[in-house]
Image (cartoon, rainbow, N blue to C red):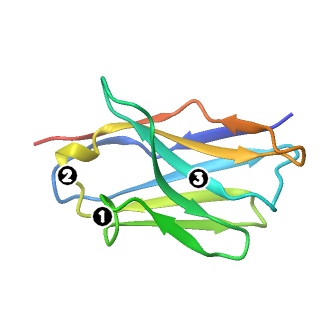
Amino acid sequence: QVQLVESGGGLVQPGGSLRLSCAASGSISRVYPMDWYRQAPGKQRELVATIIFGGSTNYADSVKGRFTISRDNAKNTVYLQMNSLKPEDTAVYYCKARDISANAYWGQGTQVTVSS
């Protein structure tokens, strides 16, 4: 069984920074990417950033240059460093991973609120 636990969300002023963490346990497959998604009120969940085992990354255009995804394979943890936060970044952030059978798992989410 795979479990994903996100942490690090909170309230931050525009221009501020937060670092999200997602700790994975269980049979996580390193073949598949790990992802961060977000869902704002009234909107669909969207992909924010992706990282593969080798370290290659990909970002949504809306966060390029501001967010950085990283992965500690020894700890089975993925991070999302978010800088220069904007009010439109307000959302619940979720991490996603797959097991060796390619089944997808989601964490419970962590709320990020950007407001003055």
Residue under numbered circle 2: 86
Callout 3: 10 Å neighbours few (<14), some, many (20+)?
Answer: many
Give the label on residue 72, or none.
Answer: none
Where is residue 16 shown, x and y percent of the image? 23, 58
Tell whether 79 sits left or right of 59: right
Residue 78 figure quarter? bottom right
Where is residue 81 shown, x and y percent of the image? 43, 62
Tell whether 89 sits left or right of 56: left
User: Dividing the image into 4 quarters, which one contains the N terminus?
Assistant: top right
At x 46%, y 36%, the residue is 110
Residue 25 drawn above or below residue 81: above
Sequence order check, earlier mark of 3 and 1: 3
Residue furthest left as drawn = 116
Residue under numbered circle 3: 35
Where is residue 62 shown, x and y percent of the image? 30, 58
Q: Is the residue under label 1 in contact with that under label 3 (CB below 8 Å)?
A: no
User: Dividing the image into 4 quarters, which one contains the C terminus?
Assistant: top left
Q: Secondary structure at mark 1?
A: loop
Callout 1: 10 Å neighbours few (<14), some, many (20+)?
Answer: some
